[in-house]
Image: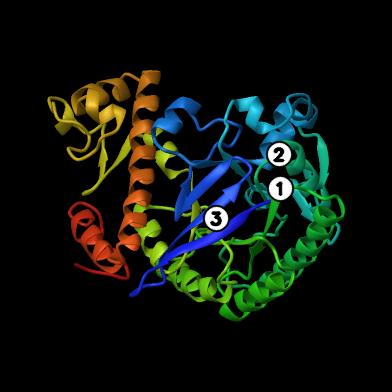
Amino acid sequence: MLNFEILKQSSDTRARTGRIKTAHGCIETPVFMPVGTLGSVKSVSVEELKQCKAQIILGNTYHLYLRPGIEVMKRMKGLHSFMNWDRSILTDSGGFQFFSLAKLAKFSDEGVTFQSHIDGSRHVFTPEKAVEIQTVLDSDIMMSLDWCVGYSGNKKDAMEALRKTTLWARRGKDFWHEHGCKNSLFGIVQGEMFTDLRKISAEELAELDFPGYAIGGLSVGEPKNLMYEIADFTLPVLPADRPKYIMGVGTPEDLVELTGMGCDMFDCVMPSRNARNGQLFTGKGTINISNARFRFDGKPIDDECSCYTCQNYSRAYLRHLYKSRELLSYRLNTIHNLHFYLQLMEKMRNAITNDCFGQFKKDFFCKYSASTPSSPMLTC
């Protein structure tokens, strides 16, 4: 079972450090979780993830259920042994995938009926089945099935999604408790961009006493300022002694802003996906490695980066690989981006520990805004 300990509280922000203990080790928070949708963080090995100091990765319940399938996962004794990863794993519930593939899904109080995007076969996910599948995956942290809605401003739809999310959270928690699941189950707050609904959702889930809580339904088309406003409102409403996780967010700026608001956990496909598209993160902002200006550039991606890619390869070579569509491009770019994200989290943990997070945040945006639009909430 999960154990969470708060280690240090910032004196000038809501930022905090903590330690989550799972069956597969300790996780220092705030933490970023690389996304391994199909049991693989695209283009990198688990050894390279460890070299980047990844503490925990995220797997996708919906996709793993469809392929390789639950019978394979049972035979392989769970996701850890299947992918040879001996550190912690969090699995989502499939709720966001049903939102993304809404044309293939039908929602009811019972659960979600959907067609596979792979072969068109029909399946049913109930909140109980979502927990059961994640138990087979044997992830350290499981997520309750939720109903995620996009940014529409339709309060009636948001209220219905909230109602179903709470109903499903209660049923999933009951199943989790009745079957003595050793994996920890988190509840997910919904409510779209309405603060009153977010408060209701957070309070209803808090009554169910989950080991941790997530905020879902952000970064789904809303303006950045509104996303920050909802996160800033919702995070303090959640129980202070539990891990707080914002799902699917985001940019380096997002991680800094939301850590300052008290978020403990993050995940996003951005570092790996953007790497495959040639966008690389540096302390001064992002660069597009395909740009002609890098053709003769013998410098590393980032002079201050200690990752394997920056220590061994030039921008000119990385541009050549990318323009030539060499597979090595994806690997080297992803190693760098993941290292950047995970090092950013470590720097924030150190700043909180030394009680200087407010200054760290200001310095970060003053430097990062050299080539990237500044934070909507802080200017240099």
* Vertical side of 79 occupied by 243: above or below: below
Looking at the picture, which amino acid does disc 1 mark? Asn
Mark 1 and mark 2 residues within 8 Å of each other at the beta carbon: yes
Q: Position of residue 161 (x, y in %)?
A: 71, 66
Give the image's coloring scheme. rainbow
C-alpha span from label 1 to label 2:
7 Å
Q: Position of residue 214 (x, y in %)?
A: 59, 61
In the image: residue 51, left or right of residue 185: left
Give the mark, 3 or 2, whose residue is nearer the N terminus. 2
Residues 135 and 257: in front is 135
At 83% from the left and 39% from the top, the residue drawn is 122
Pointer 2 residue: 138
Camera-nearest label, 3 or 2: 2
Looking at the picture, which amino acid does disc 2 mark? Asp
Residues 56 and 115: in front is 56
Mark 3 and mark 2 residues within 8 Å of each other at the beta carbon: no
Residues 139 and 66: in front is 139
Residues 362 and 331: in front is 362
Give the mark, 1 or 2, whose residue is nearer the N terminus. 2
At 87% from the left and 55% from the top, the residue drawn is 178
- Per the rendering, the mark at residue 269 is none
Query: The residue tagged with tag 1: helix, strand or loop?
Result: loop
